[in-house]
Each structure stands twice: as C-alpha cells, then as structure tokens.
Image (cartoon, rainbow, N blue to C red):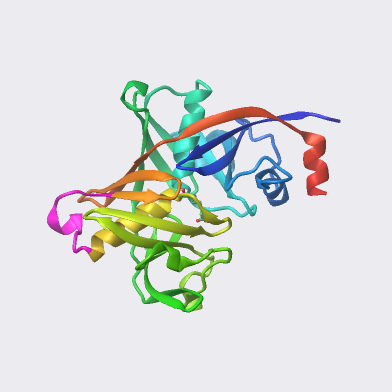
Amino acid sequence: MSTRIAFLKGHGTENDFVIIPDPDNAVELSPAAVTALCDRRAGIGGDGLLHVVRSAAHPEARHLADRAAWFMDYRNGDGSVAEMCGNGVRVFARYLQHAGHVGEGDLAVATRGGVKTVHIAKAASGGEITVGMGKALLPGGDVTVSVGDHQWPARNVNMGNPHAVAFVDDLADAGNLYDPPPFSPASAYPDGVNVEFVVERAPRHVAMRVHERGVGETRSCGTGACAVAVAAARRDGADPAVTGAPVTYTVDLPGGRVVITERPDGEIEMTGPAVILAEGEIMSEWLETATA
Ligand SMILES: N[C@@H](CCC[C@H](N)C(=O)O)C(=O)O
C-alpha cells in the first residue's frame, strides 16, 4: 500500500540533512533507506539524516527522556550511525522550533553522545543557535594523516565522535578529498575518523576543510570545528583550565562560519546558523524500490 512519509530539508553552514519527523519512532530507517534518501541524484540528497523521535519512544534514548524530550537519531549519508553531529543539533533544534514543539530560548536534545543543551536566540538578534557541546577528550598519542605525498602530524580530539586535526600550510594541500585520508597508526581510530585540515587566518581565527567519516568532504562539520578550536588553542598555548579564562575561536568552513568558546571547566559552546528550507512527502513505494 502506498503511504507518504513526511520529510524536511535543512542545513547548518551548508552541512545538509534530510529530516524525518517521527515522534513515535514508527518509520523503519534501515541503512539502505538512509543511503537512498541522502543520494543527491536519485534521492532527496544530504550529508546525513536527522530522525526526529521522542526520547521516550526510542530504545537508545528512553533513559534520557526525563532530561530531554527529543532524541536526535543521527545517521551519516552512507547509512552508518554516529555519536554526535554538531551542525545536526542546530538544524534539529530549528526543526523543533519550525514545527512549534519549542520556542526561542533553551531546550535539551538527547543524542548518542549524551544530552546537549541548546539555546535558540531571538529572531530579532539573528536567531543563531548555541549548543553546549560538552568537553573535548584529548587522548594523546602520535597520529599522522596523509594525502598523496603530503603527511602531517595530527591532534587526536574526541568530541563524542573521533577527529584528527592537522595544521597545514594551504587548504589546497588536502587535494580533492574524494577518499578518506589514510592515517597511522591504524589502531588510532578503530571505528574510522573525521579528518580536519586547518590553516591560520588571524589570531584566534582559523579556516578548515573536513573529510567526514561516513560521508566524504562536506561543506562544514560542527564537531570538527570544535575539535579544531581545541587543537588550535593548545597549539597556541591557550588552555582555559590553566589560565582560568575562556578562549574563543572563529572557524571558517567552506559553507560558513561558526564560533567556538571553550570555558575553564572544559565545556565547549558552538554558535552558528541553522536553516529549514523545504518540506514534502516521500512516496513509500519509491523507498521500497530504492532499498530492494
Ligand atoms: N557533520 C557532523 C558530524 C557527523 C558525524 C560524523 N560524520 C561522524 O561519523 O563522526 C557535525 O556537524 O558535527
């Protein structure tokens, strides 16, 4: 029987998502279905998918339902599951606002990386969204990433999901980034890694490109921007836990700009835009054929 599945499309600094509102967790989203929906030619198209479910209705988030009413069931475009998506949380919050589930101000969003606090600024002051991203883990160890003949030492930063941050002379040195940049040692990232390439723009201001695990090169990565800000701060000798003062970095990405602040207690805040741009219906018979 032909049914319709509601969807929306949104992006945060051009990291774009198919959004599936599904409060009761009734829509079956297999990895093949996610891949089909994110396909830019035969599907709707997106770097990833945001499945919007009430925490109480999802087995992975039920235990968080008393702290956050909504669960961001995030999937990469290749159908894989990731712990966190920084741009995704902003777009997720914008969707909740668009649908009338929340207003401007504060809310909490459950993710596989824990509960994130979100603040939606008033439209009159730009409407940007700030996310409490939690603390970065800096596991240490020497990591190297390479592209073609270039090799760089990289900083291992975990923002709930894994990142390798390499400071380069020129963003073009990262090449076309069609393939995941090899890293060593192979044991550093058993579940794969997001790789960021970073250049200095000005004091406390960097620019980056990213190759995302499960996606490819994207126009932006929120967790990646946080990882880059922390790696840049340590490289610049700025550790808020030591100085007692917050440190803020502006991070330029191909798709826009986010601002990252790390506080003396280690908590990281990311501020940036989020846009909902379309809504429609998916034909279930197409999805069945596409995933057969
Ligand atoms: N684009 C995201 C990160 C999405 C998850 C990532 N590809 C992974 O597998 O860890 C962001 O904005 O943080």
* Residue drawn at x 57%, y 41% as measured from the top left: 17
Q: Is residue 151 above or below residue 292?
A: below
Can residue 107 be seen here? The reply is: yes
Given the current orientation, which residue lies at the most extreme right position?
Answer: 1
Can residue 67 be seen here? The reply is: no
Viewed as shown, does residue 247 lie left or right of 143? Answer: left
- Residue 282 included in the magenta stretch of the image: no
Residue 197: give x, y in percent of width and height.
41, 63
In the image, the segment drawn in magenta is 236-249
Viewed as shown, does residue 287 lie left or right of 65? Answer: right
Q: How many marks?
A: 0
Residue 20: give x, y in percent of width and height.
62, 35
Quarter of the image for residue 171 reads: bottom left
Residue 207: give x, y in percent of width and height.
35, 55
Q: Quadrant of the N terminus?
A: top right
Q: Nearer the viewer, residue 141 or 279?
A: 279
